[in-house]
Image (tube, coloured by chain):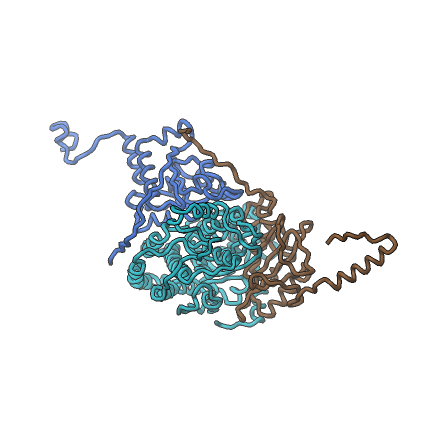
Amino acid sequence: MSDAETPSIDDAELAEESVEEVLEEELPQPELLHGVPVSESRGQVVLHPSRDEYVALVSSLRELGYWMCVDLCGVDYLGYGPNRNLPAGVAPERFEVVVGLLSHSDRSRIRLRVQIPESDPELATLFLIHPSVENPEREVFDMFGIRFDGHPDMTRILMPDEWVGHPLRKDYELGRIPVQFKGASTAR
Amino acid sequence: MGIVANVQADGLAGLEHNFLTGRVEDLIRWARSHSSWPATFGLACCAIEMMATGGPHYDLARFGMEVFRASPRQADIMIVAGRVSQKMAPVLRQIYDQMMEPKWVISMGVCASSGGMFNNYALVQGVDTIVPVDVYAPGCPPGPETLLQAIVTLHELIETGEIMRRREVTGAGAGVHLDELQLPTSSALTIGTR
Amino acid sequence: MTSTDLTTLNSARDRLTSDGSVLRLSETEAEQKSGYQAPTEEGLGERMIMNMGPQHPSTHGVLRLVLEMDGETITRSKPVIGYLHTGMEKTGEELTYLQGATNVTRMDYAAPLFNELVFSLAVEELLGIEVPDRGQWIRMLMSELNRMSSHLLFMATNGMDLGAVGMMLYGWREREEVLRFFEAVTGLRMNHNYIRPGGVAADLPDGWEEELSAILDIIPDRLAEFDLLMTGQPIWRDRLQGVGVITAEEALSLGATGPILRSTGYAWDLRRDQPYLKYDQVEFDVIAGSFGDCFDRYSIRLAEIRESMRIVRQIIEKMPEGDYRVQDKKVTPPPRARIDESMEALIHHFKIFTEGFKVPEGEVYVAVESPRGELGCYIVSDGSSKPFRMHIRGPSFVNLQTLPHLMKDSFLADTVAIISSVDPIMGEIDR
């Protein structure tokens, strides 16, 4: 997107304006579903709410029949090379919280991907809408260090309380230690 | 006429019952090896195979071991069956400490023995870093036959007294490594008739 | 399916979030506070905080429960997990897609084939390949047999937990029959790594129909013995009926799936409602209960063994001929015979097993009905030969959240019955 021509100082303001105008016209408007940008992945519907829209969206989807929150997990996109398949207007951040909702009445699933910035890893909890997220949210906190605001018990779940670090982050080492052969008698 | 008088009169022929002679030490070892009760220390996949070993087909009762004790204070053998996580390690050590001497440890499966395929932050790489291990049973999970062989090996070691001698010297277990039993896969299914 | 409406659902949810049946203590606090608790100003009477597990004979592995007791009655409780945390999701990022099945199969070790199945389905979805018919039918056959062996394991442990120690022997006896078939097909009794992305590892051995028919002839009689030993017995019924009751709305709110959800009368089964493999071509019933108690959950599992046998019989009849894995050179290694005569095949084989195959970028969630409920797999691929992120939605992990609600106001002696009826497998909970 680098422009070869640098505009002169005189018409800088004008150029800026026109660029903005042009960008606005050219930017593809994101396709919306339930009021938020939507994309498709292998035939599965994925919604991309912002952090502010997230809770309201989940509760309105509940009204529409998505009664069950089956899954909630985190993803750390640090070092992810290719295009992340985000619709226009959704800025990629390091973390994502992925929520799977299920509607029994029309037997369909819908997935939510919420972008969480590294600088402020926090998200509102879904606990009051779907109590089923209690354990999964604790797991995401434990593994990724994303705090869920309003969760009744935001503590580690899988690792011991005093553990340092969040193991599923990409910058957390796997922790492999070299294999030690104890008491090996023959050295070939 | 008492027994003493009989013996005084006829020597050993004066006894009404047969008997064996032996050293007390041997007798105790024999008794220990034939009624060593395991603690239920099932952790993961291996625990299912350990239970299968106790089931009707493999029948651990043949070795005087069918009484799985839930309380470590009543158990003699700890079969560490499965992967030991960093969170579980202190618990495991505590249970080992609660067991009465003499006590023995079988490390069942590669995860308990060396961490196995999970060489990562969460697992203790080998339970022998926490407790002295006497017999390592390989396999993922070891079949009931392999576990039985580990148990029989341990019984032999108990009977010869080798383990306790070694533990006195080094503080560690016998450290016997078994080979996994390569039994032919049963192609023909023989199913018990009722 | 019993219908419910949003209003009942919402009120059930609000009750669950506010009734305080979960004891929210951190591990350290629980340790400090264990033992006698004096009455507090908040209106709580004399009570006792008790620790159960992680090493306890009836917690099915290494589950730990912190219980708050008022005399013999449980007021609040909290399951503490993580004692079997293996870091499988992290390790999964280090293994190629072909190796991935070995990793996931060790999660739910009572039903390993389902883990492999859901992982393979997710990878195939990303690859955009379809497994040949025979491969799909073999997968279905193996997973139904695995459902049987898993439920038989439940019968054994559930019986033993409740004092019917003989069930430990009977349950294992039947399970051994199924395992012997598994060993003949996959070479292993557990952790098979048999279902792999692209198909299954090997075709069924010769004479599999007869072997299976022999099993199918034996087990119905033995299940009748189960009925005799347990279902009709007054002690058995007294210990299970009306214990650990949950409503459909509560189960939905807590995300419970599988026999727990179905025991409430809410007949939701992914095999029927979102069919995968060839489940739309076989006939079976979805078993549902009506009271949502421990007895219903027991009966559902017993009936599901019979339904699985019904499916297996149909599979034996309908098993098509053909390939058992895709003939896509990118995914499938060449057959053994070709390696001996062709250098290219040897290199190809080597490449697949060392580097693995590349999977197009994208993300996908796939779910199957495991014996414990909805088993899901979410994979993010960055176009390389290893998953960028692999997440397994373990049914036990979510089902475990029902425990405090099931146990509230029940007796201490019932905890064992309730834990057992949820049928948690710790390997899948902690991963």
Q: Is residue C5 above or below residue B38?
A: below
Comparing C386 with B4, the one in front is C386
Q: Is residue B164 above or below residue C391?
A: above
Comparing C107 with C420, the one in front is C107
Q: Residue at x 85, y 58 (%)?
A: A14
Colour in which the image shows chain A: brown
- On screen, residue A155 versus residue C295, left or right, reads right
Which chain, by letter, is blue? B
Colour in which the image shows chain C: cyan
- On screen, residue B58 versus residue C252, left or right, reads left
- The picture quadrant where one finds residue B161 is top left
- On screen, residue B79 versus residue A154, left or right, reads left
Residue C224 placement (x, y as % from top left): 31, 64
Comparing C238 with C232, the one in front is C232
- The picture quadrant where one finds residue A42 is bottom right
Residue B101 seen in the figure: yes
Q: Residue at x 59, y 53 (%)?
A: A74
Residue B84 placement (x, y as % from top left): 47, 43
- The picture quadrant where one finds residue A90 is bottom right
- On screen, residue C102 versus residue A153, left or right, reads left
